[in-house]
Structures are given as structure tokens and as C-alpha cells.
Image: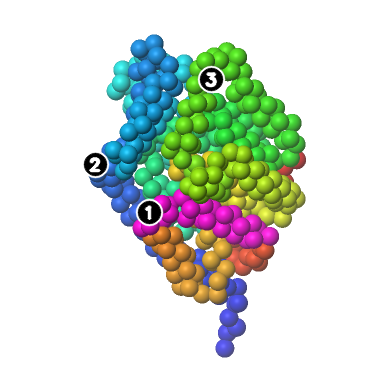
Amino acid sequence: MQRRDSASTSPVDSIASFFLTRSRAIAVTFWVLALAAIPLWTHYDKPGWDIVFYRNAITALHAGHDPYLDAMAVQQAFHATLAQHPNDTPPYSYVYSPMTLSLLRFLGALPVWLSGSLYWLAIILGAFVPIFVMRRVKQEFDAAFFRIVAPVAIFFPGLLAQDTVLSGNVAFILYGIVLLGAAYGWHRNKWLWCYLAILIASVFKAPLLCLVAIPLFSARRQWLPTAVTATLGLGLFAVQSLIWPSLFHHFLQAVELQFSYNRDFGSSPAGVFSYIITGHGVPYSPYSEIFYLTYAVVLFATLLYLSRKFLDGDFTLAQWVPVLLLGVILLNPRLMEYDLAPLALPMAMIGWRFVRRLSSSSAAVALYFAVFLAANLIGAGINGCWKPTECVLLITSFLTGCWTLLHPVRLTSNATALHESHTVKMA
């Protein structure tokens, strides 16, 4: 009787073969369905609700008004009569720094059809950048799974169903340029473009300055350029109070109203904590800052430790990137749905790499989709549970990713060669 090769029946190969069967046909079908669903989706869910606030700011600027004051006046009027319409969606302000107003004036000078078309094109491209980036850093045995989940990732930011891509938020563009800069850095070990992209992103959203941790934890000798970029970002933010003191003061007021009026804290651990305590009448400051700093220090130290192991060759770039992106974005104290869009594929791959270690391919697949389905049913089915559910998913995914990195499995197929070729030791 011929001896059976144990490698051919390992859990990794067994699970990989489960998805490799007809995976390309399934992927093509999913892409067709996803692209066909978008026009139907936009028909029933009117897109561009964040663009409305950008357009209102442009209108205010062209009228010679302060866009922050105009938006805050609308918010204050709404909340003054909140008892008459408690279930209505509250209005939001333009909450980007005064430095961005020049860009608004430029866009406002263009024909609406032209500026709108260019902007939506940039949003679409930015939304698909994570697929391009993750495709370049996937492992061989992720290929079939990646092909299947990639077309639906846009519908599940942070693995929970949400229509945030239709918002038209500028975050999709900002994350897109940062991830392209990161992909260039991972491929060429040249990080200037990534730092420039992060600096641009931080002008619009100051918390995105935390993304400087991507090059810091991806390559050696990045402490100085990271410190310079962080200093420049903070300097650009602070200097606006000197150049436009009145606008900057109103900008900070508009940001504060996002929290005090709308309790718009997001899905991060600090955000969910702030939402809970304000619901019990406790002011979010300074308790949320203390809570954030407590876990951010631990998170940063964990990423630093794992990055040293990566740079020493203990695991590959393909293994490191999903955990790195998740951990770095978790450093943002306010994670909104659009901040979670780049995490759909990294979180999906972390989960898949964990469950594929099970002894049975069918059990692994069943467990993966059972957790996915349960999380979405809880997040969408129970009022007010989307953000807490997402917070649990973020923390669980990061801890799972760390455990998977620190407990590697022995590769048993030709994936071993690819594993070795992807190991990066940055000089």
C-alpha cells in the first residue's frame, strides 16, 4: 500500500483546497453581483450625505460667511427644538481645519458637474485602493479566500454591513493616498511619499497623523522621519490658530459640538467608552482622554514589539500588514465608519488565517461565517449596537492577529517558498 504524504492532508492544505475549488468562478460572480448592486443601492439610499455639508460650507464661503458659524447656527436651532423631533437625524458641521477652506473655494469655482464628477471618481478609486494593496501582500494560501471576499468588502467596513461608502466622505481619498504611499514603501523601502500622504491627510483630519506608525513599524531607521512628520503635522495644526484665529476658534467649537450635541464618538474603545459615560450624564472629558492614553500606550508597545520581530524575520510582510494596519488605525481615538473601510480586508484575512488552523475545513468555514453572520445580526438588528459590536470585533481581531503572529504554523505546501521570499529585513 502506497504511503500517504501527511503534508497533503494538513489542515492548512485541506482548508485551502476547500476554497480553491471554483474560487475564480465564485469571485467573478461576486464581482458581477457587487457591481450590479451598487446602482440599486444608490437608488434606495441617496448617496452623498457628507457632501451636503461640504457643499453648504462652499455656499457659505461664496457668500462671505464663516462656514463654521453658519453650520453651528443650524445645529443650535435644531437642538433648541429637539423635543419636537426627537427621532430626526441631527445636522452636522464642516469640521475640517481652516487650511482646507482654500480647496473648498477652488472646488466651488468649478462647475458643479465637473467638481462632483472628479470628487466621486476620487472616492471610488480611494475605496478600491485597499483591495489593490492587500492583493499585493496576501499569502499564496490566502488567494482563493481573498478573491471571494474582495468584491464584497466595500459593503462591510470593519466586517459589519454599512453604507458608509455612499457618504462621499473625504476619508476614502485620504486613506487611499496613504495606503498607496505605504504600498510603495513596502515594495521599494522608500517612505517619503507615504509621509507626505499622511501629512496631507492630517490637514483634513488631525487624528490621521497616527498613521505615521505605518512606516515606523515597517522599516528600520524611521524614528527621525516619523518624528519630523509628526512635528510638521502638529505644527500645521497649531499655526492655523495664529493665521486664522477666529476661524480656528470656531472650527474647534464645531468639533466640540460633534461630541456634546451629537455624541458622535465612533467605534474605537475610547469612542464607545465616551458614548457610555455621556449617556449616564458623565462628561466625556477628561475621562475619555485618560482611558484612551491607557490603552494607546499598551497598543503602541505591542506594535513596537511585533515590528521588531517582523524586522528580525520572524514573520513575513504578508503576515504582518493586516495586523499592522488594524493596530495603527486603532490608535485613532475616534473611529467612524469610513475609518473602518480600509480594515475590512485586513480583518477578514486575520480571521481566516486563525480559523484555517482548525482540523476540519468544513468546521473552519462554518465557524468563520457563523461569527460573521452573528456579528452582523447583532450590529444591524439591535438598535444602538452597531458601534459596540464593531468595537468588540476590532479588539478581538487585533488580539487574534497578534496571537497568530506569535504562534506560527509549519507550512506544508509550496506556500513555504513564498513565505520565505516575502520575508523582509529592512536594512
Q: Nearer the viewer, mark 3 or mark 2?
A: 3
- Nearer-the-camera pick, 137 or 252: 252
Q: Residue at coordinates 61% horizontally, 18% vertically from top-left?
A: 239
User: If the image is split into quadrants, where does the C terminus sit?
Assistant: top right
Amino acid of disc 3: Phe
Q: Residue at coordinates 59% horizontally, 23% vertically from top-left?
A: 237
Secondary structure category for the residue under label 2 = helix
Q: Which residue is mark 3?
A: 248
Q: Residue at coordinates 65% horizontally, 33% vertically from top-left?
A: 190
Instruction: Say if the magenta span includes residue 383.
Output: yes
- Nearer-the-camera pick, 239 or 125: 239
Instruction: Say if the magenta span includes residue 8.
Output: no
Colour scheme of the picture:
rainbow
Q: Position of residue 399 (x, y in %)?
A: 61, 57
Amino acid of disc 2: His
289 vs 336, left or right, is right
Disc with the residue nearer the chain's start (1 vs 2): 2
Q: Which residues are magenta?
A: 379-406
Q: Nearer the viewer, mark 1 or mark 2?
A: 1
Residue 196 appears in which quarter of the rendering?
top right
User: If the image is split into quadrants, where does the N terminus sit?
Assistant: bottom right
Q: Residue at coordinates 65% horizontally, 48% vertically from top-left?
A: 295
Q: Which residue is mark 2?
A: 43
Amino acid of disc 1: Asn
Q: CA distance from mark 1 to mark 2?
A: 24 Å
For mark 3, does the 10 Å Cα neighbourhood hold few (<14), some (14 to 19), or many (20 or more) residues?
many
